[in-house]
Structures are given as structure tokens and as C-alpha cells.
Image (cartoon, helix red, strand yellow):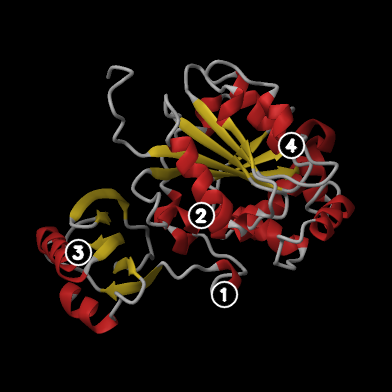
Amino acid sequence: MPDHAPNLAKTPVTIVTGFLGAGKTTLISHLIRNARGRRLAVVVNEFGTLGVDGDILKGCAIPDCPAENVVELANGCICCTVADDFIPTVEHLLALDPRPDHILIETSGLALPKPLLKAFDWPAIRSRVTVDGVIALADAEAVAAGRFAPDPVALEAQRAADPGIDHETPLSEVFEDQLACADMVLLTKADLAGAEGVAAARAVIAAEAPRPVPVVELIEGVIDPAVILGLDAAAEDDLAARPSHHDGEDEHEHDDFDSLVHDAGEIDDPATLIARIEGLARDHDILRVKGYAAVRGKPMRLLVQAVGARVRTQYDRPWRAGETRATRLVVIAEHDRIDPETIGRALHD
């Protein structure tokens, strides 16, 4: 594709989360220096005198990630300032010429990742970006010791200094929320923790994570970018698999869209389901349908992904032993467009 040709594909975004001092900026600095031809852009949301702000990342600037592609958000915790800061910033980066091939977002040490993940369904950006992956950094020594953060005092000072943080979440719950959203966990400072510390930290992560996630040991932020970029997780499409202690709390919700979950049994014909989803989008302004279906007689699960009336399906994996074969679809629409009875009738098998 020529450089001047419009890029109609969604721009992938990697969210890098983890406590202050876990090594987020060190990791992103390494990714910038090893971009391998990718045009990168970076959003930094960090606070506190012990945090590392955007100036250091701008100092790592290279042609594939010039200084103007590094944006620092300093008006508050990004998960609490989505509308005011995050959405305009992403729009700004998408308007750059040339447009970034990949956007990295470094959250503050106290940010809750799921509200940020939900922001990718906002009308202004949902058709233009996708969450390639959520990467959670965890300090191996701190996790093994049950402190979770390498410097809890500094984090509390950050909380006190930032009036934009409107959630008073215990550090243990923030850690659990970070793990719950993650597609991969990077266990940092593995050399300092030693073999026993790393083993203990891995045990904690395995116990706290709601689903199995890869855990990779890391020293000084050095990792092959191919390991964490290009995951194609589309994390915004499986929010239900990323539980949070704050699910349902008003201060971390926005009312631009509503959703419901449609549960059903096995279906006979995928083509019929696709037609029903297409009709639902046309007749009732449904924005998204995503989930999976159990097709009678098929050993594989059918993954369903619809944007408006465009429906994609694929068999993604076999049904696991003991797993209930069922159809489960998340339906998303603009505020006040969700009617459970109407949707149930339209999708009923």
C-alpha cells in the first residue's frame, strides 16, 4: 500500500498498566527504541515525583516515534477523565500525518484499566481503534512479599496529590483489577526477586487472575516487541471476561451505550443466526453483537462478531470437556435503544 493511501483498518492500541515503579516507562522506552519500522505514538498518564513522565519518553524519540507523537495527560487519573482527556487525545493521534501504526498507552499507577477499556466503545473512536492487548506489569519482589507495589507510600502520595483520582481502591484490589484485564503479565525485576521470589509471585498471579494468562519474566524492560505487540486481542470485545471490583459503579460508567447479554441453547444453523443479527442491526439500531454460539452437531465453538449489520463468524476452538454448550451474545446499542424483549424475540431460536 502506498504511504499516501488511506488506512481504513483499525489502529491497534496496547494498554500498559501496573503500579508506579513496576517498570512501565522502561518497557515503553525499550519498545520505542526497537520499533522496527512501526510508527508509534504514546500516551502517558503518570503522576508523582517518583513517576517518570513524558519527557523521558520524548527523549527516546526516533523517526518512527517523534517527540510530537508522545502525549502526556496530567489532568488526572485517565480512568476518571475519559471524556475530557482520553477521547480527544486519541482523536488527535489518529489525525497525525502519517498516522501511527500502533498506539501505546501508559496508565498511571492507580488507574483502573477496565473503565479505560470500556472507552474504546465510545462512538467517536470505536470504529477506528482496537485494543491489541492489555499488558500488566508486576514487580516480582513486591508481589512475592504481598505488597503488590514496589513503593506503596509513593502510591498513596500520588493518590493524595491527584484530586482527579475519585476511587479510593485498596492496592490489592487495583492489582486484582489489573490482572483481570490483562492479556499478558510481565513479571519485572525478576533478577532482583530471585528464583524463589519469582515462583512466589507466579503463584500469587495464578491465584488472583480470573483466567489463565501468560506470565513472562522481564529484566530492565527488555523484551522482543513481537511478544507483546500484535496480540490482536480485541480486548474491548470481551469485557465480560475481564471482571472488576468496580463493575456497575456509576463513577466509572458512561451512559453513551447500554448492553445486555442474550443467553440461549444450541442453534441449528449459523446462517439463520447471522440473518437475525443483521435484521436486529437494521431494524433496531444495534451497534455491536459479540459472543459465541453452540452449533448443534459441531465440536467447535462459533465466535460471533458483528459491527452494525456486518457479521463475522469463525469456529475458534473446540468445546472443552465439561464446558456447557450454550450460546451467549452481548448486544450493545446507543443509550435507550436496548429493549430486552425485542432483542430476545429477534434472536430467539
Q: Give the distance between the C-alpha atoms of the residues marked 4 and 2, in whole angstroms.
A: 22 Å
Q: Which element type, helix, strand or loop, lies under badge 2?
A: helix
Q: Give the distance between the C-alpha atoms of the residues marked 1 and 3, in whole angstroms.
A: 28 Å
Q: Which element type, helix, strand or loop, lies under badge 1?
A: helix
Q: Quadrant of the N terminus?
A: top left
4 or 3: tag closer to the N-terminus = 4
| Residue 67 falls in image quadrant | top right
Q: Nearer the viewer, residue 32 or 322?
A: 32
**On the image, numbered disc 1 is attached to which residue?**
250
Visible in this render: residue 223? Answer: no
| Residue 237 falls in image quadrant | bottom left
Indicate which disc residue 281 carries.
3
Q: Nearer the viewer, residue 160 or 210?
A: 160
| Residue 140 falls in image quadrant | top right
Q: How many marks?
A: 4
Indicate which disc residue 135 carries.
none
1 or 3: tag closer to the N-terminus = 1
**On the image, numbered disc 2 is attached to which residue?**
117
In this rendering, position of residue 272 left or right of residue 80: left
Q: Residues within 10 Å of mark 2 (few under 14, many from 20)?
A: many
Q: Nearer the viewer, residue 180 or 90?
A: 90
In percent of width and height, residue 113 lies at 59, 55
In percent of width and height, residue 168 lies at 75, 68
Q: Residue at x 62, y 53 (%)?
A: 78
Q: Which element type, helix, strand or loop, lies under badge 4?
A: loop
In percent of width and height, residue 329 lies at 30, 66
4 or 2: tag closer to the N-terminus = 4
**On the image, numbered disc 4 is attached to which residue?**
53
Amino acid type at circle 2 is Leu
1 or 2: tag closer to the N-terminus = 2
Q: Quadrant of the C terminus?
A: bottom left
